[in-house]
Image (cartoon, rainbow, N blue to C red):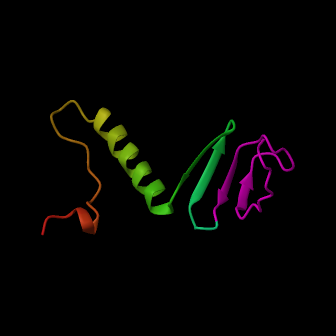
């Protein structure tokens, strides 16, 4: 037999596509400061820096895939401090 426990939701909602519709897409911040994005009931939670890194990686990939055909390369994003060689 399983025991049911009540838990308190400590997330703070920032945006909801349709107010009052708990199935609508939404964005929230967790108690630990991570950002959660819920689209279609599938939630991805990551720290803000990871969301930014993920978006930068995708943007860079997008630019590379659409680089000019004249042999020049698309611009790349600068490396983060911890990624630079010492």
Q: Position of residue 49 (x, y in %)?
A: 44, 62
Q: Identify whether 76 is placed above or below 73.
A: below
Q: Is residue 69 left or right of residue 16?
A: left
Which image quarter: residue 39?
A: top right
For the N terminus, the quadrant is top right
Q: Position of residue 53 (x, y in %)?
A: 40, 55
Residue at image location 36% in from the left, 38% down from the top: 62
Residue at image location 50% in from the left, 60% down from the top: 47
Q: Is residue 70 visible?
A: yes
Residue at image location 26% in from the left, 68% down from the top: 81
Q: Nearer the viewer, residue 26 or 56?
A: 26
Q: Position of residue 44 (x, y in %)?
A: 57, 46
Please report the bounds of the magenta region as a residue range.
Answer: 1-30
Q: Is residue 12 left or right of residue 74?
A: right
Q: Main secondary structure of the magenta part?
A: loop
Residue at image location 78% in from the left, 49% down from the top: 3
User: In this view, which residue lies farthest toward the right?
Assistant: 20
For the C terminus, the quadrant is bottom left
Q: Is residue 75 left or right of residue 12?
A: left
């Amino acid at each position: 037999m399983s025991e049911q426990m009540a838990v308190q939701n400590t997330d703070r909602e920032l945006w909801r596509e349709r107010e009052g519709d708990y199935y609508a897409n939404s964005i929230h911040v967790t108690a630990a400061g991570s950002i959660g994005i819920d689209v279609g009931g599938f939630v991805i939670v990551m720290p803000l820096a990871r969301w930014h890194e993920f978006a930068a990686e995708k943007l860079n990939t997008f630019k590379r895939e659409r680089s000019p055909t004249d042999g020049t390369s698309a611009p790349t994003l600068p490396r983060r401090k911890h990624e630079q060689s010492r």
